[in-house]
Image (cartoon, rainbow, N blue to C red):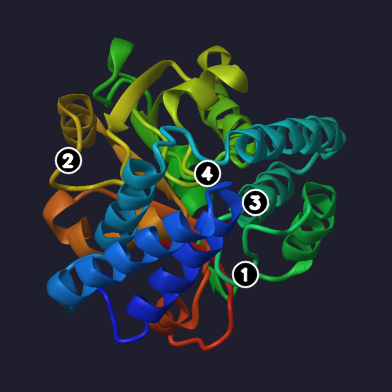
């Protein structure tokens, strides 16, 4: 999904919210915003993914501020909240007997947890962490406006072992994560897939950018105890960058029998490249702006489970 006319204002709004939490003085804030606007005025076009521009403005903010890991405490808080809520969910799911109902409930939470993105315009950087549980519960209660869960369940249930590309010819699921906090819920879906005989590769960022989850965040939530293999997706890019993706990710994309894409930034890329990739791609996200909702012919912000 390429950039649209509403993207520049949204990007500047986002970076304005970011610098207000970075603890830098006003002259530095102005310098960051001015350089970001200058960059967009020279580079913005409708043929580029929005995530490319968001990545660059946050790199500008990191460079000028001298902060290599902005929002460090906020990122940790989100991971802590995610861990707490995911443990509650795991206990709740144990009591469900019907397999499809259990799987559907799990996906509802996995998608709702995408709302943990403190970067989101509309949610904003200033939402108190203690209110996040309330926000996630509200999202869980909302029905999917795009719902391919039945197709997804059928696919992960029926793909036979012995015909995949993983060890012992297991089918391979490449799980591309989005934000801190929600990665704790991602672990539960990874565990479910492994229990069904899938070999699961977890792809995390090599460097911090806004709220995107890094390899270090993966260690913090003990992702190594869930995924079969953890790889670096690339450097500090918002979502996956086709141009900056790692050799590990390139290999995993070729090997995968299924790709699971979390979040809006990753959706930008996969909705644009899915025919080139030519693999089933399950996109799990909550839309963060009307422009992305318009892809699904909606105007409001929605929960999405879309199989490309």
Q: Do the CB atoms of the residues marked 2 and 4 lie less than 8 Å apart?
A: no
Coordinates of residue 184 in the picture (x, y in percent): 64, 33
Q: Residue furthest front?
A: 27
The residue to which callout 4 is attached is: 179
Q: How would you rate the neighbour count of disc 4 (Cα within 10 Å): few for under 14, some for 14-19, many for 20 or more?
A: many
Above or below 123: residue 163: above
Depth check, mark 1 against mark 2: the one in front is: 2
Is 22 above or below relative to 232? below
Q: Nearer the viewer, residue 30 or 108?
A: 30
Q: CA distance from mark 2 to mark 4?
A: 19 Å
Pointer 1 or 2: first along the chain? 1
Which residue is labeled 1 in the image?
A: 144
**Front residue of 306 and 176:** 176
Give 129 or 226, whichever is nearer the viewer.
Answer: 129
Q: Quadrant of the C terminus?
A: bottom left
Give the CA separation, mark 4 to mark 1. 20 Å
Is residue 308 visible to the viewer in this orientation of the structure? Answer: no
Question: Do the numbered discs 3 and 4 sit on residues whose CB atoms are within 8 Å?
Answer: yes
Q: Earlier in the sequence, mark 3 or mark 4?
A: 3
Q: For the residues marked 2 and 3, what is the alpha-carbon distance in whole angstroms?
A: 25 Å
* Residue 268 found in image quarter: bottom left
Label 3's element?
Answer: helix
**Residue visible at 47% across and 45% down in the picture:** 178
Check disc 2 and report its element: helix, strand or loop. Answer: loop
Q: Residues within 10 Å of mark 1 (few under 14, many from 20)?
A: some
User: Which is more N-terminal, label 4 or label 2?
Assistant: 4
Q: Which residue is mark 2?
A: 244
Q: Residue at x 73, y 59 (%)?
A: 127
| Residue 33 x/y as whole percent | 38, 65
């Amino acid at each position: 999904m390429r950039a649209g006319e509403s993207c520049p204002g949204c990007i500047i709004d986002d970076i304005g919210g970011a610098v207000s939490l970075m603890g830098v003085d006003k002259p530095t804030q102005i310098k960051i915003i001015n350089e970001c606007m200058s960059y967009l005025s020279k580079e913005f076009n409708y043929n580029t993914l929005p995530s490319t521009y968001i990545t660059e403005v946050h790199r500008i903010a990191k460079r000028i501020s001298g902060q290599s890991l902005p929002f460090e405490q906020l990122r940790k808080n989100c991971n802590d909240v995610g861990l707490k809520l995911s443990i509650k969910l795991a206990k709740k799911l144990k009591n469900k007997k019907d397999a499809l109902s259990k799987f559907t409930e799990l996906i509802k939470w996995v998608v709702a947890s995408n709302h943990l993105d403190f970067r989101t315009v509309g949610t904003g950087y200033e939402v108190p962490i203690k209110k996040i549980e309330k926000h996630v519960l509200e999202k869980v209660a909302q029905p999917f406006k795009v719902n391919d869960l039945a197709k997804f369940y059928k696919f992960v249930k029926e793909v036979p072992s012995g015909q995949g590309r993983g060890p012992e010819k297991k089918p391979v699921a490449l799980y591309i994560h989005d934000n801190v906090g929600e990665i704790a819920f991602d672990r539960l879906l990874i565990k479910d897939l492994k229990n069904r005989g899938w070999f699961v590769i977890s792809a995390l960022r090599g460097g911090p950018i806004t709220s995107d989850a890094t390899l270090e965040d993966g260690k913090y939530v003990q992702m190594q105890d869930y995924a079969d293999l953890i790889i670096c997706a690339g450097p500090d890019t918002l979502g996956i960058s086709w141009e900056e993706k790692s050799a590990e990710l390139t290999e995993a994309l070729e090997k995968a029998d299924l790709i699971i894409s979390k979040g809006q930034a990753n959706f930008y890329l996969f909705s644009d490249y899915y025919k080139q990739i030519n693999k089933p791609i399950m996109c799990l996200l909550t839309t963060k702006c009307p422009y992305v909702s318009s892809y699904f012919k909606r105007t409001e912000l929605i929960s999405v489970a879309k199989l490309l």
